[in-house]
């Protein structure tokens, strides 16, 4: 059983956060809430998302898995206004998810989850943790996209830096410790990342005031932020681009 009602903007955030990496996702439904873990086809990035039952207007569920085509669900969400409440009802006998938006009812076929592996979040002990305002880092990403396809993230005991190098131009966002929400770094660390992936992740985090970045030397970046007024949480992991000597 799964019956729930949720605000349109929260469900839209879940779709947008996940669909930047995958077209389909396996949702784990429990009485406490929903969660998913998914890796993009290139195995460069992954998302780990959880949404507690308190994020919903109404919520009743038993343990089950639902394979959802995110494109189909996004099509339905285009019918919704910001203040709408979306009804979700899983019909086990027909293996369909019934989605109601205002007076529109869509019976949506589900995806077979048998071929969807369960992604595992690696246990990374990264030496630097930076909490930065999402508006600040969004500006740095926007400036970088004009000149490069990759971005370098650097942290040390004094601050955080985002930089991009093009053929002729460069961009640098340098935030000293007093302009960050918080900073923990015992050493200088730096890693290079695909700007396309990183920019999409930052865009997905726009609803959050602050973003936690965990960094190492030529290690994946772990990005974390809250959604649904703190009743949900998102973790992204992005593999680094290793610079050749």
Image (cartoon, rainbow, N blue to C red):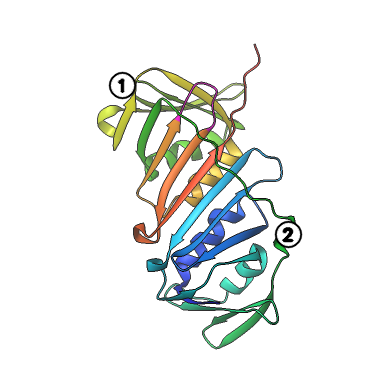
Can you say which quadrant of the picture contains the C terminus? top right
Residue 125: numbered disc: none
Gap between marks 2 and 1 measured at Cα: 48 Å
Residue 121 percent across, percent down from the top left? 55, 41
The label nearer to you, 2 versus 1, is 2
Q: Residue at x 34, y 20 (%)?
A: 186
The relative height of residue 223 versus residue 70 in the rendered view (above or below) is above
The residue lying toward the viewer, choosing from 72 and 94, is 94
Q: Position of residue 205 (x, y in %)?
A: 45, 50
Seen at 62% across and 46% down, the residue is 119
User: From the viewer's perspective, is 1 left or right of 107?
Assistant: left
Furthest-bottom residue in view?
Answer: 103
The span picked out in magenta is 215-220
Sequence order check: which comes first, mark 2 or mark 1? 2
> Up-down: is 48 above or below 149?
below
Residue beneath label 1, please? Answer: 158
Q: Looking at the picture, does residue 40 appear above or below residue 6?
A: above
The answer to whether residue 178 is visible is yes
Q: Name the residue beneath numbered marker 2.
A: 114
Left or right placement of residue 116 versus residue 177 in this view: right
């Amino acid at each position: 059983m799964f019956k729930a009602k949720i605000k349109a903007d929260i469900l839209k955030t879940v779709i947008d956060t996940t669909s930047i990496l995958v077209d389909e996702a396996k949702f784990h439904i429990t009485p406490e809430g929903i969660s998913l873990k998914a890796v993009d086809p290139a195995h460069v990035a992954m998302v780990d998302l959880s949404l507690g039952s308190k994020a919903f207007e109404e919520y009743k569920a038993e343990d089950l898995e639902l394979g959802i085509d995110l494109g189909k669900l996004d099509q339905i969400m285009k019918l919704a206004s910001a203040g709408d409440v979306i009804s979700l009802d899983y019909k086990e006998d027909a293996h369909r998810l019934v989605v109601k938006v205002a007076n529109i009812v869509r019976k949506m076929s589900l995806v077979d989850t048998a071929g969807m592996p369960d992604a595992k979040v690696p246990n990374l002990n990264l030496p630097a943790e930076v909490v930065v305002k999402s508006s600040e880092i969004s500006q740095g990403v926007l400036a970088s996209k004009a000149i490069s396809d990759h971005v370098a993230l650097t942290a040390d005991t004094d601050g955080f830096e985002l930089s991009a190098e093009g053929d002729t131009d460069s961009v640098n966002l340098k935030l000293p410790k007093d302009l960050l929400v918080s900073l923990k770094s015992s050493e200088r660390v730096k890693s290079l990342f695909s700007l396309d992936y990183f920019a999409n992740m930052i865009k997905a985090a726009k609803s959050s005031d602050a973003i936690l970045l965990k960094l190492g030397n030529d290690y994946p970046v772990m990005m974390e932020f809250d959604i649904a007024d703190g009743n949900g949480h998102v973790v992204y992991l992005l593999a680094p681009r290793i610079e050749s000597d």
